[in-house]
Amino acid sequence: MTRLKDLYKSKVASELQKKFAYGSPMATPKLKKIVVSMGVGKAVQDKKYMDNAFKDIMVITGQKPLVCLAKRSVSNFKVRQGDKTGLKVTLRKERMYEFLDRLINLAIPRVKDFRGLNPKGFDGRGNYSMGMDEQSAFPEIDSARIETQQGMNITFVTTADTDNEAYEMLKLFGMPFKTTEQD
């Protein structure tokens, strides 16, 4: 069992149960999946950007990414319908917890001038989204071989009903949020 899954079962679930007084242990919020996505708009002009991003996201997540196609043509960006413009990976179960552990303990501390994650990244339904400016924060990526910096979006999908429940759950996992007035 991964470290964070064990932490959830031993500590996080019981803390949430106490704080929000759920009627059943099954009502306790859980982490359903983590979606990691990269927009690779430069791939329209040069295919090597897509190849590099594909390799990087595969090394970071340990899973082959899905190539996303443009839904419609945009002449200002020289994008045609059907062009390859992005990549995404959906992580579940063991890989999800392993990725979350590496993100919290290895990648986020390596970000330059980090002052905490913005707690306003919740969508109103208990899901949290954050962005990373560069893929080199992950230790799996060799920074000497990077040709261009590539950002990525990371979305945490939970079973929580409210943002407050999801915030508390992610905070108990160790997510370094900026401190707010309510803490």
Image: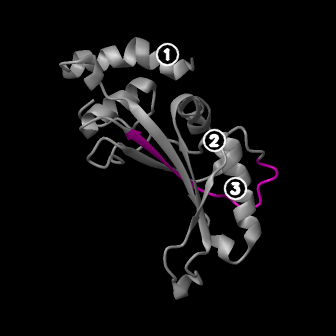
Colour scheme shown? one colour
At 26% from the left and 47% from the top, the residue drawn is 124
Assign a secondary structure to mark 3: helix
| Circle 3 residue | 54
Q: Quadrant of the N terminus?
A: top right
Image location of residue 95, percent across then percent down: 58, 32
Tag 3 near tag 1, CB within 8 Å: no
Checking the image for residue 6, the label placed there is 1
| Residue at left offset 70%, top offset 55% | 54
- At x 57%, y 35%, the residue is 103
Mark 3: amino acid: Phe
Which numbered disc flags the more N-terminal residue, 3 or 2?
Answer: 3
Figure check: 1 above or below 61: above
Q: What element carries label 1?
A: helix
Mark 2 to mark 1 CA distance (whole Å): 20 Å
Residue type, label 1: Asp
Q: Tell me, yes or no, whether the highlighted magenta stretch contains residue 65.
A: no
Residue 178 in the image: state x and y as whole percent: 39, 38
Of 67 and 161, nearer the camera is: 67
Magenta highlight range: 143-157
Please name the residue that numbered disc 2 is placed on: 61
